[in-house]
Image (cartoon, rainbow, N blue to C red):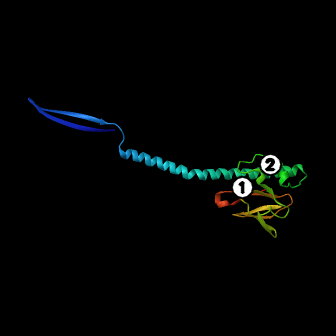
């Protein structure tokens, strides 16, 4: 709000009369409006920049939780079947509570000494797993090594296994969990 002072002077028969009138203008100045719009624009920009990163982190957290659930399912299967390692179909019956990012169809169990078809190569005692988006691979007799775009796996005991998936943060870095 701004106040404008106006002075009116008139001369009539008898002398000079002066009258002061104050006029109040309601509303905002253009500077105030532009400033508010600029601040609102910055807030919206920060939200739209931060939102995809937040969603990506939430999906990665769900994937990591899925890996833990699948590792628990492998352990439960082995406990109920005298230490036997499950195949993909048997594991699907034990897998519960996976997120919307993972379905039971996307969980593969690799063979004894190789990875599931098309997911990696084995050289000597070191195995390297390349996991496609959304796929979770369970490998028997392996331990997690260094993670990158491919997951290094080393030879483990008969009871050891790894569960490997790919996460979005870090441009598709593999995530591995030991048994």
Q: Nearer the viewer, residue 27 or 123?
A: 27
Q: For the residue carrying disc 2, how many other residues have a C-alpha within 10 Å: few (<14), some (14-19), or many (20+)?
A: many
Measured as percent of width and height from the top left, residue 65 is found at: 72, 50
Earlier sequence position, callout 1 versus callout 2: 2
Q: Is residue 2 visible?
A: yes
Q: Position of residue 152 (x, y in %)?
A: 75, 65
In the image: residue 21, left or right of residue 77: left
Q: In the current view of this chain or complex, which residue is farthest to the right?
A: 82
Give the structural element (helix, strand or loop) at label 1.
loop
Q: Which mark is residue 95?
A: 2
Q: Tell me what residue is drawn at x 24 percent, y 38 percent.
A: 5
Please name the residue shown 25% across and 34% down the image.
Answer: 22
> Mark 1: few, some, or many residues within 10 Å (few <14, many ≥20)?
some
* Residue 52 image point, x, y percent: 59, 52
Tell me, for residue 105, which label it has, or none: none
Which residue is at the front of the view, 36 or 134? 134
What number of labels is visible?
Answer: 2
Q: Quadrant of residue 115?
A: bottom right
**Farthest bottom residue in view:** 124
Return the mark for residue 134.
1
Q: CA distance from mark 1 to mark 2?
A: 16 Å
Q: Quadrant of the C terminus?
A: bottom right
Please indicate whether residue 56 sits to the left or right of residue 140 in the image: left
79 horizontally vs 105: left or right: right
């Amino acid at each position: 709000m701004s106040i404008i002072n106006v002075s009116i002077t008139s001369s009539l028969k008898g002398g000079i009369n002066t009258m002061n009138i104050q006029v109040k203008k309601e509303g905002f100045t253009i500077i105030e409006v532009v400033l508010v719009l600029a601040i609102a624009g910055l807030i919206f920009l920060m939200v739209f920049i931060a939102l995809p990163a937040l969603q990506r982190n939430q999906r990665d957290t769900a994937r990591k939780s899925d890996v833990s659930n699948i590792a628990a399912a492998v352990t439960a299967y082995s406990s109920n079947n005298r230490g036997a390692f499950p195949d993909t179909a048997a594991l699907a019956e034990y897998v519960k509570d996976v997120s919307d990012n993972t379905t039971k169809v996307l969980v593969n169990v690799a063979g004894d000494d190789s990875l599931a078809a098309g997911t990696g190569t084995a050289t000597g005692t070191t195995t390297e797993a390349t996991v496609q988006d959304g796929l979770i691979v369970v490998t028997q007799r392996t331990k997690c090594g260094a993670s990158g775009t491919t997951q290094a796996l080393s030879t483990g005991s008969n009871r050891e296994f790894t569960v490997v998936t790919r996460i979005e943060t870090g441009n598709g870095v593999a995530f591995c969990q030991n048994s």
